[in-house]
Image (cartoon, grey):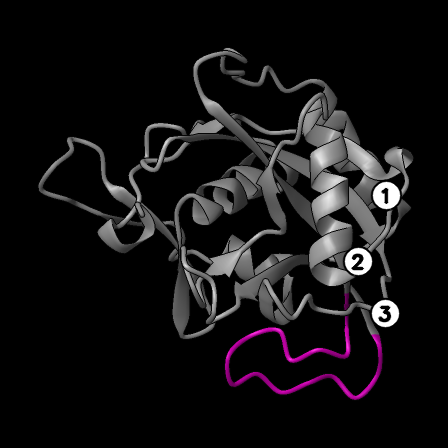
Amino acid sequence: MLADDSLRTLITHRLRTFDRQELPSTGTRRAAVALALIEEGFGAALPGARAPTLWSTDAAVLLTRRALSLRNHPNQWALPGGSIDGDESPEQAALRELHEEVGLQLEPDAILGRLDDFVTRSGFAITPIVVWAGSARSLVPSEAEVASIHRIPVDEFMRADAPMLDPIDDSVHPVLRMPVGDTWIAAPTAAFLYQFREVCIAGRITRVAHYEQPLFARR
């Protein structure tokens, strides 16, 4: 799957026609994440994966591993993102966080659309913003926030064993995980990735806000 104009047009169309679920703007702490479509490049995207010898233009999603020094969720998989400041829109916050966390500065026309809001157990209402990042050859992790940057091929999220749904004692809804290589990503990041796969790539209307997070991700 190439990161080309036809893929960008397809994703843009599907997001524009997607009847997304939006949460009220009051009474919750607001945050935004950037689900950035990017070329796979040279990076060994998956744990233990072999790096391409030539620059790959296959479509990938930009993810990070959070810095070990962070108080909340150290070393967990994440999409670049954070709290919405002041009068920022979710789109403005997502683009700012991309720049702060991985040194990627994009213009507003890179925004393709939004997926459903997701409320975390820690009390944040997160809006996922899908953006087009192109080749993005020069990425620089923020020492304070990011341990490593990964370009995960979109095809990896189309695996037949995804999503992984696990029962949990304190909820009628299962915990959602997305497999990546020989490991996995937990919700809420996994929820955004799964809905992206379903809505933007497979063309299926799929809701994810009801899925649970594992206990370690609720802090």
**Label 2 sits on residue:** 2
User: Are discs 1 and 2 less than 8 Å apart at CB?
Assistant: yes
Magenta stretch: dominant secondary structure = loop
Residue at 86 percent of width and 69 percent of height: 137
Circle 3 is placed at which residue position? 138
Which residue: 73% across, 21% down?
16
The image quadrant where one finds the N terminus is bottom right
| Drawn side of residue 27 relative to residue 114, left or right | left
Seen from the viewer's position, the closer of residues 62 and 40 is 62
Which residues make up the magenta segment?
Answer: 40-55
Q: Secondary structure at mark 1?
A: helix
Residue nearer the viewer, 21 or 59: 21
Q: Give the amino acid type for the residue marked by disc 3 in the picture.
A: Ser
The amino acid type, in three-letter code, at marker 1 is: Ser
**Nearer to us in this view, 16 or 83:** 83
Foreground: disc 1 or disc 3: 3
Q: Which residue is mark 1?
A: 6
| Tag in front: 2 or 3 | 3
* On screen, residue 98 above or below 124: below
Q: Position of residue 155 (x, y in %)?
A: 61, 59
* 176 part of magenta stretch: no
Q: Is residue 166 left or right of residue 53?
A: left
